[in-house]
Image (cartoon, helix red, strand yellow):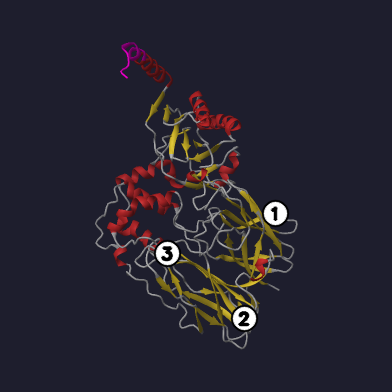
Amino acid sequence: MIPSALTIKNLRTLSAIIITWAATYGLSHAATERVGDFALLDETGRFHQLSRYQHREAVVMLAYDAGCPAAREASLELARLQQQHGEYIEFLALDVGGASRGQRQQWEMPFPALGDEELLVAESLSLSQAGEILVFNPERMSLYYRGGVEENLANRLLAVEKGEASDTVTTEVSGCQIDYADLAMHQQNPPDYSTEVAPIIVENCAICHRWGGAGPFAFDGYVSLLGWSPMVREVLLNKRMPPMQVDPELSNSPNAHEISAEERQKLIHWMAAGAPRGEGAIDPLEEIPLEKEFAWQLGEPDFVVKAPTNIVPAVGILDYEYLEVELPFEEEKWVRAFQYSPGDERILHHLMTFVIGPDEDFWGPEKTETTPERRFLGSFIPGENPATVFPENSGVRIPAGHKLALQFHYVTNGVEIRETTSIGLYFADEAPENEVLTRAVSERFTIAPEDPEHPIAASYKFDQRVKLLAVRARMNYRGKHMKFTVQPPGGDHDVVFSIPAYNYGWQPHYWLNEPRTIEPGTSVQVAGAFDNSLSNPFNPDPREEVTWGLESWEEMFTGYLTYYVDE
């Protein structure tokens, strides 16, 4: 139908009114502004990822600097808005002033204050001033609002709750300029590829991202890094890589991979500057051997356990494979060290090995008890795969007649593969003083459908003095975070290890840099949460109620404590 001249005239008049009103109040509508995913830790060490808030209607985030009056005033207004909309909308602050975690704790805000190391997230979001506010659509990774604290923000939040918001509304901001001095410096003088950028990739990424490795693509030269640079930037900002994200301020382990904030900044700023090749004659990525050559790190083992061959199909989602290996020893043996020799790292997702009795299976007493003591040899995940050497004068005992129980988890790789893994065992010449044991601390539960934060905790009180050597977190697809704390009699609790971003695919046995003495009467608590909502990208079905069980389609909550009695 052709609109009448009167209708056209009315539309023109209405448009003129809207334009005049928007100009008067500094409000403008624009095409929807897209944003990238990001993840940061708050002042308590809690993990926050934008895409993990899809169960919320929106996320409001304030660029905050404690030295900026406009930002402080904005935080007060956001606290008021949180009281009105907090049931449906998440509120956060993003530190753009370089405060430490302890300083952010002193702010005592009613919403989490995220630490933005080297301002990488602020840069990615094009924030210009402290006091600026962004309202995210976490499902579509876009913005509902960019601007200051004013009536337009309140109206926008009402529109979000009513389902009437779509495009991006922007308003003027009167705040304090954010200083991006490092970004400006690197735009003028980008990090050098040969001496600064490539060595970071060699040290932190290439062990898996090589031909025949666990990574889905190889970094074998400048061109490959250039081609994959958008993906590298994405996984650095949302902390998907490097794997095994632990809290660096609370946890120390040689098994935890970490790229420092300064290294992340060099990589991202190099990409932002156009990823220049530079003039270095040598490309460190081209120096990496195409194939990883396996070698027994401690020399030829005293005994090599060869697991039965598994046939891994070309496609599909695979459940656990359980295998048992009989041992020929007529007397007890003490393992002082061991090393896995994986058959094919492309498909071997992880492997766990327990020492079990003649009539036990892999899970043993964990099927019926919540805090059983077990003999755990160790686990394998893709990566460097060094030998595990137990502390001096200690080891894992294999009683006569016992065997090894192995749990394999494979991923498919497009072709059928026959995989055979071996384990090299190194024995002590005589029985050491200390037997290395592992206690499984677990709990039973039921998780309701659509629950984004199902809290759970379990604990065990030691009645002897022990040396805590290592911890391991075990949940399945809905695991969200886990923390290990100690509570001495009459004392304050102290965090031993924290995994704020649990990922089912990347959980090794974390050996502590320094063994922790646990006095008699001390409780070790394992606390965490499950995410059974649509915000969890690994969740098979958020509509389902989930119960405890030992298989991968069920859920479990177990913290493994490895120690020896220190009499």
Mark 1, Cα crowd under 10 Å, few <14 / some 14-19 / many 20+, is few
Q: Which residues are magenta?
A: 1-10
**Residue farthest front in this picture:** 1
Please give the label number shown on residue 402: 2
Report whether 301 appears left or right of 391.
left
Compared with 459, 77 (above or below) is above
Compared with 137, 257 (above or below) is below
Query: Which residue position holds label 3?
Result: 412
The answer to whether the residues at label 2 and label 1 have Cβ atoms under 8 Å apart is no
x and y, in percent, of residue 34 in the image: 39, 38
x and y, in percent, of residue 409 in the image: 50, 66
Report whether 361 appears left or right of 292.
right
Q: Which residue occupies 29% across, 61% down?
A: 221
Q: Which residue occupies 56% across, 29% down?
A: 77
Compared with 512, 336 (above or below) is below
| 6 within the magenta span | yes
Helix, strand or loop for disc 3: loop
Does residue 192 appear in this view?
no
Does residue 457 appear in this view?
yes
Helix, strand or loop for disc 1: loop
Between 537 and 313, the one lying in front of the other is 313
Disc 3 marks a residue whose amino acid type is: Thr
Decide which of tag 3 and tag 2 comes sooner along the chain: 2
